[in-house]
């Protein structure tokens, strides 16, 4: 298994760079994972990441894209409640790229 | 991944056979399943340290499959290398790697078959092109049997009717047996057994998502359309790919199914146990997994006491349902164990069991039980992409070719603008989306982009000439694959959607006036 090193600590990641132990996640790790995805985290990114983590803690899965866009829309205004806004933040797709940075398990299947 | 910078191949002015680029895809390998993933579904965790042990297990498994499946033996013996299949494969067209010619992909196994299972190959291997099974050969199997989407387009053109997908499935079955499984497919199969669906969506999350959908539909239409879960005594059990609960544009079709049942006044339910129509057991050529995954649906149907079983927009699930459920599970006539007999008594014989959601919707349209405002789809110029497993491995309605006509009939009933893509790329000769059969995984994105080339060329033609801006399809894999690869070809990712997404847009819900 591959390891990443952030601030002198080592964390185990899978072939695709997802954290193996979800409890390993912290904000420094998120910044590191974002860098590997060529994403620079802004407050807008953190709003999404924090929602993802809250949802995950409750349901043990990332939210459906629709659930995410609705929640963001409610919080930040309707003009941001769409997947286009999320794709601007996370170009490889909110479901997978944002999950990776938020330290969540990757959604699998036909998605 | 955030990586640079895979480019789509250029559109070709004339669709000629590409000049060969030997080995061009040798480095494109799906991730190998970990021991944990393998063992969770009863496979050997990893390759044995001693090659001879792996070799013997692989050959023994091959012998086992040849004995069990007469088709496989016929396919091994009957190919005459005529080459009719060579340029019919989207992966060969897109990658130019000669090992992606269907005949060459099969030859990887056929040469080993000759060596161990035919007299000339045992005595004079070099005269008949017979090869020992070596580690290099096994690696080639892994690489190239995971560059096949089991779409069976090549088989349409084979004068002997050789089903290449069966060879790919056998190859994958042997690889699983020796501990050389594919991460993407085998992890998903583990999740189906553990959590109930490919996505890993637990019951409470499913419930939450469905409640959210009810709110959304209420906001959009003012009508209380229900998306019920685990309702005992409902008439219809709808089994659909779990991506329909999660991904865009998939979820738009789920909204459409609910509106159809609402408008027709049919009681229906989803099941948290059978919250997945997909069956990756078929992709890996493993009968036991195929059956075990299918049996969840029988269990859910018996528990819920439903009268009808309907399958949502999922290509390979419809193949599994249409072609295999009867003998695997007794949904439809076939199996004769006590549970199958009980289920057959429970199900309503007035309906096809199972039915495809398109059959349900088309029947209702013909009976005049659904009303549409077709102008609601007027911003769309629509074409239809036939999904391989529906097109070449199943049927809808009561005549040959119904699986082509019924989805098109529905589109034409709910929308005014419909255009067909070039005739050699649709219906039984449809091109795979490039992501089917267990290759819809990020590390194979290069293969997926290149494999989409023929479909993208046909789409480009109707987009340029007819202004097509919506490609409808009835498969979760096709939807996810196109959403990902369309931008590489200069299209908007939103150009793909479901047939029931179009239904959803135009349907009148009856109580809204």
Image (spheres, coloured by chain):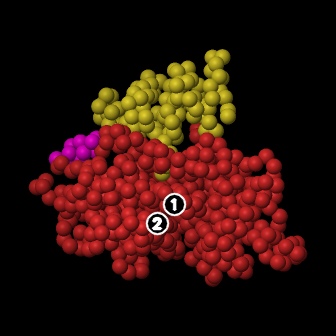
Q: Main secondary structure of the magenta part?
A: helix
Residue at the location (66% across, 49% down)?
A: B44
Chain letter for the red colouring in the rendering: B
Provide the chain ID for the residue under circle 1.
B
**Residue B359 visible in rendering:** no
Residues in magenta, as a range: B211-222
- The picture's colour for chain A is yellow
Q: Find residue B93 and report its horizontal and vertical position in percent.
A: 64, 65
Q: Find residue B162 and report its horizontal and vertical position in percent.
A: 63, 76
Q: Distance from label 2 to label 1 (Cα)? A: 8 Å
Q: Is residue B53 covered in magenta?
A: no
Residue at the location (38% across, 63% down)?
A: B339
Residue situated furthest top in the rendering: A8
Tell which circle, 2 or 1, labels the residue nearer the N-terminal end.
1
Disc 2 to disc 1: CB gap under 8 Å: yes
Q: Find residue B281 and report its horizontal and vertical position in percent.
A: 54, 58
User: Could you classify mark 1 by the number of other residues whose Cα lies within 10 Å: few (under 14), some (14-19), or many (20 or more)?
Assistant: many
Q: Find residue B407 and report its horizontal and vertical position in percent.
A: 36, 68
């Amino acid at each position: 298994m591959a390891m990443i090193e952030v601030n002198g600590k080592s964390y185990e990641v899978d072939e695709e760079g997802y954290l193996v132990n979800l409890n390993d996640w912290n904000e420094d790790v998120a910044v590191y994972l974002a860098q590997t995805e060529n994403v620079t985290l802004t407050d807008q990114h953190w709003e999404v990441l924090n929602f993802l983590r809250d949802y995950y803690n409750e349901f043990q899965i990332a939210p459906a894209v629709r659930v995410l866009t609705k929640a963001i829309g409610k919080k930040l205004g309707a003009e941001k409640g769409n997947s286009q806004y999320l794709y601007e933040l996370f170009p490889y797709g909110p479901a997978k790229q944002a999950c990776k940075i938020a330290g969540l398990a990757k959604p699998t299947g036909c998605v | 991944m955030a990586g640079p910078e895979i480019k789509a191949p250029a559109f070709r002015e004339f669709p000629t056979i590409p000049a060969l680029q030997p080995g061009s895809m040798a480095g494109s390998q799906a991730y190998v399943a970990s021991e944990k993933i393998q063992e969770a579904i009863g496979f050997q965790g990893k390759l044995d340290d001693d090659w001879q042990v792996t070799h013997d297990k692989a050959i023994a498994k091959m012998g086992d499959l040849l004995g069990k499946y007469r088709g496989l033996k016929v396919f091994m013996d009957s190919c005459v290398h005529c080459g009719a299949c060579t340029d019919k494969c989207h992966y060969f067209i897109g990658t130019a790697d000669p090992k992606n010619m269907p005949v060459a992909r099969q030859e990887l196994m056929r040469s080993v078959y000759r060596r161990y299972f035919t007299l000339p190959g045992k005595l004079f291997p070099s005269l008949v092109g017979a090869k020992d099974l070596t580690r290099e050969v096994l690696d080639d199997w892994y690489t190239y049997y995971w560059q096949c989407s089991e779409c069976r387009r090549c088989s349409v053109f084979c004068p002997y009717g050789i089903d290449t997908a069966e060879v790919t499935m056998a190859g994958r079955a042997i690889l699983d047996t020796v501990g050389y499984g594919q991460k993407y497919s085998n992890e998903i199969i583990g999740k189906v057994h553990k959590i109930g669906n490919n996505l890993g969506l637990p019951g409470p999350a499913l419930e939450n998502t469905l409640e959210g959908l009810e709110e959304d539909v209420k906001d959009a239409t003012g009508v209380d359309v229900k998306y019920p879960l685990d309702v005992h005594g409902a008439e219809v059990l709808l089994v659909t790919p779990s991506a329909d609960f999660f991904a865009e544009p998939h979820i738009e079709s789920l909204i459409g199914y609910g509106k159809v049942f609402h408008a027709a006044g049919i009681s229906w339910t989803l099941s948290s146990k059978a919250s997945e129509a997909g069956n990756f057991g078929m992709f890996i050529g493993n009968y036991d997994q195929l059956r075990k995954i299918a049996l969840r649906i029988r269990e859910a149907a018996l528990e819920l006491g439903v009268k009808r079983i309907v399958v949502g927009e999922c290509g390979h699930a419809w193949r599994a349902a249409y072609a295999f459920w009867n003998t695997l599970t007794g949904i439809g006539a076939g199996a004769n164990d006590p549970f199958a007999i009980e289920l057959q008594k429970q199900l309503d014989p007035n309906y096809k069991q199972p039915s495809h959601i398109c059959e349900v919707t088309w029947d209702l349209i013909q009976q005049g039980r659904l009303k549409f405002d077709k102008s609601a789809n007027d911003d769309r110029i629509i074409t239809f992409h036939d999904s391989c497993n529906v097109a070449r491995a199943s049927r809808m309605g009561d005549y040959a070719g119904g699986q082509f006509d019924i989805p098109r009939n529905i589109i034409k009933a709910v929308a005014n603008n419909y255009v067909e893509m070039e005739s050699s790329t649709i219906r039984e000769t449809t091109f795979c989306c490039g992501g089917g059969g267990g290759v819809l995984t990020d590390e194979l994105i290069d293969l997926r982009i290149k494999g989409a080339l023929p479909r993208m060329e046909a789409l480009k033609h109707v987009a340029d000439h007819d202004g097509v801006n919506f490609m409808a399809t009835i498969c979760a894999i096709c939807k996810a694959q196109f959403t990902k690869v369309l931008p590489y070809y200069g299209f908007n990712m939103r150009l793909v959607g479901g047939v029931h997404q179009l239904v959803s847009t135009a349907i009148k819900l009856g109580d809204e006036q």
